[in-house]
Image: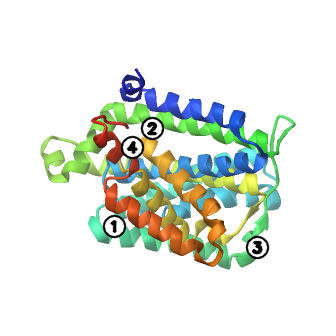
Amino acid sequence: MMAALLQSRYGIVLLIAAGIVLIPLVTPSTFYLRVAILVYIFSIAVVGLNLLMGFAGQVSLGHAGFFGIGAYAVAVGPTHFGIPSWASLLIGVALAGLIAYVVGRPILKLRGHYLAVATLGMGILIAMVFTNEARFTGGPDGMPVPRLVLFDWVVRGVTTWYWVSGVSLVIAAAIAVNLIASPTGRALRAIHDSETASHVLGIDVARYKLVVFVISAVYAAVAGAYLALFDALVTPVTAGFLRSIEFVTMAVLGGLGSILGSVVGAAVLVVLPQMLTVFHDYEHIALGAIMIVFMIFLPAGIVPSLGRLFGRKFS
């Protein structure tokens, strides 16, 4: 019955929702809830990136730039322009989508490593703006982020953010599942298999690639805004190159083309460093070794590889 549920259209979404509901019942302290919040926030960004990489087959090494746009929007808007945090979040998401649309039109004509380098350059440029425009962004030291206020309700505290980020992840996963099952999703999978064949079939390849690029940027911007609001601080590291690599690693580790894999990959890369602190100076060596083992024995990613092992397909 569980296998049938996982293979249903909303089975994965229900599984994620069930996990979010159950975790507070078994965690002994708010520390674990804080770790879970980070998992949920990063999962939102990785779900969007997986739509781009796993389903459309387009590589992006600059997605932290969109993540940073969302983060800085909720800091700069209220601080310098008096815009409410909720409105700043929406503006940041819209700005990320607009930049993705403008930048995506020329760079998505590239393929393979050329596209990867172009997106990398885009991400680096965005991070440089956040570092150099100290008058608005606080420069390398970053800046504080005002609390999110919704109708006189101040969103603060670990428990509150746990449910905000958890519900947002469920919504993000549900939207992604619907997109995948739609004609757009089928077009994206066709493009992933062969852009030439997709052209022959009459699919507007450039349009669909641009659409999914914008959608993935919106996901990243929402996640970035959530992280900044939760931490009450944002720095250029939020939009740095290493953060982009982290997103790609989460997507690949969990499994490209898998919504559940996006969550699992984010969980592994957030939780493992917390567990490996017992190794002190050898923490990063242990983390790297574990990730290498994962990719050797589960080359398709954790979720797809386990699905094949049990003769099931988990999306």
Mark nearer the N terminus (4 vs 2): 2
The kind of secondary structure element at disc 4 is loop
* Residue at 41%, 29% in the rendered image: 6
The one nearer the camera, 256 or 225, is 256
* Residue at 64%, 32% in the rendered image: 22
* Label 1 Cα neighbours within 10 Å, binned few <14 / some 14-19 / many ≥20: some
Distance (Cα) linking label 4 and label 1: 22 Å
Distance (Cα) linking label 3 and label 2: 35 Å
Residue pointed to by mark 1: 115
Do callouts 1 and 3 mark residues in contact (Cβ within 8 Å)? no
The disc placed on residue 258 is: 4
Residue pointed to by mark 2: 176
* Residue at 17%, 41% in the rendered image: 202
Mark nearer the N terminus (2 vs 1): 1
Mark nearer the N terminus (4 vs 1): 1
Distance (Cα) linking label 4 and label 2: 10 Å
Question: Mark 3 belongs to which amino acid?
Answer: Gly
The one nearer the camera, 293 or 226, is 293
Question: Mark 1 belongs to which amino acid?
Answer: Leu
Residue pointed to by mark 3: 138
The kind of secondary structure element at disc 3 is loop
- Which one is in front in this view, the residue at disc 2 or the one at disc 1? 2
- Which one is in front in this view, the residue at disc 3 or the one at disc 2? 2
Distance (Cα) linking label 1 and label 3: 31 Å
Question: Mark 2 belongs to which amino acid?
Answer: Ala
Q: Position of residue 18 (x, y in %)?
A: 58, 29
Q: Position of residue 115 (x, y in %)?
A: 33, 67
Asked whether, in this view, residue 105 is left or right of residue 72, the answer is left
